[in-house]
């Protein structure tokens, strides 16, 4: 039986984050929480393979109890089991501490029901670090394929998977033994509409809660702030250079505005540098 | 006397180095200079060192010396011919454990991001992604200067400075083009030190069956000299045709802001900004881009910026060298004509 685990994160919809022009502070109120989009696509792929091969998809998330909403959403999308890892002692975790907690939980799930594939999104849109997936793979000593765009083949008998991954230069077709960890691009799978039974299941679903008390025995020195080598030292607003001249094309005319703008670029040596011998 | 080592991962594919490696050697030199005084007082040696993996890539080790490395650790083996996560991270972790670098910088490319998180976890140390400012600064309670790694957070709205107080190395990833390319010194002297790593069979089981090259045009906006970028003001995907004409005249490429990529008007390879590419072309023309923070952090280091927007209060004007308040569908055609005239004049 095919068993996949998908690590999901709830994130603020960062496309909606803005700064209060009066105070310069982040406006957090009214910013909707969503499932990290890359995780949602990874989940869709895991569920598609479950439907093809027969089996089970487990989702795991780490965060406050409000993340249960995202786990229910995952059940709606076809996951069978949802685990929320939640404890105040986990607060303040950086990517190293986060990868520890997730790795320990995944180890436990694997001991209960052996896993074939572990899915992550390529990164979370709130932090954009792309560090937790590789971190978990290292901790579990699993082969990893990042930036996965397509799973060509899952061979349970031969214990291997063939995956396409996209780099800046080309697409690589990688074969790797199972179990393996993938971090996924959105192209990995479209997000399907939830079938009615899954929708109904999700409304009733109560995610399992894992805490410092159990069922996994976490080392206190490895979690939360204590397990995090990095700290935020200070925060500030970005510094921007002095703005240049603004020309109003409606007042001086388009031709004059363009003439002046390109004239400044020429005076700064830019046109010559760009057009080379042509100028 | 001990050594304070500032490491840079020298990224290569097909025997060609990624320029971000040289940019980071320049950064490492700057960081080393900042600790030179306290190192002299303590009698410590300060070294800038590259780490290079590949097969038959000694010429790149030489190039790293020319871009400022004092030493290059070279792991030359057929197993490293093509990048693979497991053999690379395990080998680098072994060499890092041997030499105990203080700082380790890796380019935030797809390859570098795949690698950095794995190396940091193997070494159980802190890693800060996508840093835009790096400094060795004095921190209360610390005997030596520490790496202050600053990165944009929350879509570029906030700059967060991250510290890794006790774990070593202090690791950071940095995107291409955030820092300038340092001068190359062909007479540079330095040592190439060959290293080997102990790998098990299981570490090299992943294999690349095939490389598929993208069909059609490929864009390389991060190293383009000219970028003509469009935003929502384009009105429709057809607007890119006009931008492409101007880009062609200037020998440049077309870029885009995030909403256009999200909306499927153009591919992700064209996206400029924190969630896309960081660029520093000689000339950046922003047409119909309002200038969200996350866009500005990705292009504000361009040498010369011309912004065109109908809204005189558009934030993009804050980073522009010259702003034109006007309709891009009038301004861009006028620019195309003007550039053609310049070229004709120069040819004559």
Image (spheres, rainbow, N blue to C red):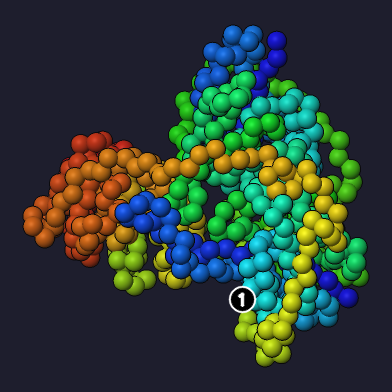
- Residue drawn 72% across the image and 52% down it: A89
Horizontal and vertical percent for residue B105?
A: 61, 35
- State which quarter of the image contains the C terminus of chain B: top left
Closer to the camera in the image, B24 or B12: B24
Residue at the disc numbered 1: A190
- Residue drawn 31% across the image and 71% down it: B235
Say whether residue B210 is visible.
Answer: no
- Residue drawn 70% across the image and 14% down it: B2
Q: Quarter-wise, where is residue A55 in the image? A: bottom right
- Residue drawn 60% across the image and 14% down it: B39
Please tell me whether mark 1 sits on a helix, a strand or a loop.
Answer: loop
Horizontal and vertical percent for residue B296?
A: 38, 50
A264 to the left or right of A59: left
Horizontal and vertical percent for residue B278?
A: 46, 48
A78 to the left or right of B156: right
Closer to the camera in the image, A81 or B239: A81
Horizontal and vertical percent for residue A249?
A: 13, 57
**Disc 1 sits on a residue from what chain?**
A
């Amino acid at each position: 039986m095919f068993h996949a685990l998908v690590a999901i994160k709830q994130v603020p919809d960062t496309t909606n984050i803005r700064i209060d022009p009066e105070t310069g502070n982040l406006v957090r109120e009214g910013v909707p929480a969503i499932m990290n989009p890359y995780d949602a696509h990874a989940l869709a792929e895991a569920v598609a393979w479950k439907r093809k091969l027969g089996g089970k998809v487990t989702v795991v998330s780490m965060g406050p109890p409000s993340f249960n909403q995202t786990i229910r959403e995952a059940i709606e999308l076809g996951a069978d089991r949802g685990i929320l890892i939640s404890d105040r002692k986990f607060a303040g975790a950086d990517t190293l501490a986060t990868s520890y907690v997730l790795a320990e939980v995944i180890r436990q799930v694997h001991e209960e029901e052996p896993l074939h594939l572990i899915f992550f999104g390529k990164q979370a849109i709130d932090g954009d670090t792309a560090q937790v997936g590789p971190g978990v793979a290292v901790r579990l000593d699993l082969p990893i394929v990042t930036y996965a765009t397509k799973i060509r083949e899952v061979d349970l008998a031969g214990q291997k998977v063939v995956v396409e991954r996209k780099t800046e230069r080309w697409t690589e077709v990688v074969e790797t033994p199972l179990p393996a960890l993938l971090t996924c691009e959105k192209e990995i799978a479209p997000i399907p509409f939830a079938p009615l039974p899954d929708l109904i299941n999700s409304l009733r679903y109560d995610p399992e809660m894992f805490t410092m008390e159990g069922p996994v025995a976490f080392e206190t020195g490895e979690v939360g702030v204590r397990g995090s080598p990095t700290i935020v030292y200070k925060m500030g607003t970005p510094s921007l250079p002095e703005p240049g001249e603004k020309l109003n094309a409606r007042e001086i005319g388009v031709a004059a505005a363009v003439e002046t703008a390109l004239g400044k670029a020429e005076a700064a040596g830019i046109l010559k540098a760009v057009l080379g011998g042509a100028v | 006397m001990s050594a304070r080592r500032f490491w840079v991962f020298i990224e290569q594919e097909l025997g060609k180095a990624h320029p971000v490696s040289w940019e980071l050697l320049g950064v490492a030199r700057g960081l080393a200079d900042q600790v030179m005084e306290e190192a002299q007082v303590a009698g410590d040696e300060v070294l800038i060192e590259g780490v290079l993996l590949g097969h038959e890539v000694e010429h790149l080790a030489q190039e790293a010396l020319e871009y400022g490395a004092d030493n290059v650790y070279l792991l030359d083996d057929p197993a490293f011919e093509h990048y693979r996560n497991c053999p690379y991270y395990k080998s680098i972790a072994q060499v890092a454990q041997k030499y105990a670098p203080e700082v380790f910088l890796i380019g935030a490319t797809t390859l570098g991001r795949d690698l950095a998180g794995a190396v940091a976890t193997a070494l159980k140390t802190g890693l800060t992604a996508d840093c835009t400012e790096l400094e060795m600064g004095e921190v209360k309670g610390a005997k030596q200067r520490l790496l202050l790694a600053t990165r944009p957070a929350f879509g570029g709205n906030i700059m967060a400075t991250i510290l890794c107080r006790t774990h070593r190395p202090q690791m950071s990833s940095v995107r291409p083009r955030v820092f300038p390319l340092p001068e190359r010194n062909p007479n540079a002297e330095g040592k190439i030190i060959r290293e080997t790593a102990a790998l098990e069979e299981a570490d090299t089981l992943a294999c690349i069956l095939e490389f598929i090259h993208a069909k059609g045009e490929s864009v390389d906006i991060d190293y383009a000299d000219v970028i003509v970028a469009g935003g929502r003001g384009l009105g429709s995907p057809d607007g890119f045709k006009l931008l492409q004409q101007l880009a062609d005249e200037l020998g440049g490429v077309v870029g885009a802001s995030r909403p256009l990529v999200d909306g499927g008007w153009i591919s992700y390879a064209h996206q400029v900004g924190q969630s896309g590419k960081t660029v520093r072309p000689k000339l950046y023309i922003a047409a119909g881009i309002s200038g969200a923070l996350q866009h500005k952090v990705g292009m504000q280091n361009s040498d010369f910026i011309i912004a065109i927007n109908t809204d005189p209060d558009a934030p993009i004007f804050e980073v522009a060298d010259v702003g034109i308040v006007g309709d891009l569908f009038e301004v861009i055609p006028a620019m195309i004509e003007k550039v053609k005239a310049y070229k004709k004049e120069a040819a004559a």
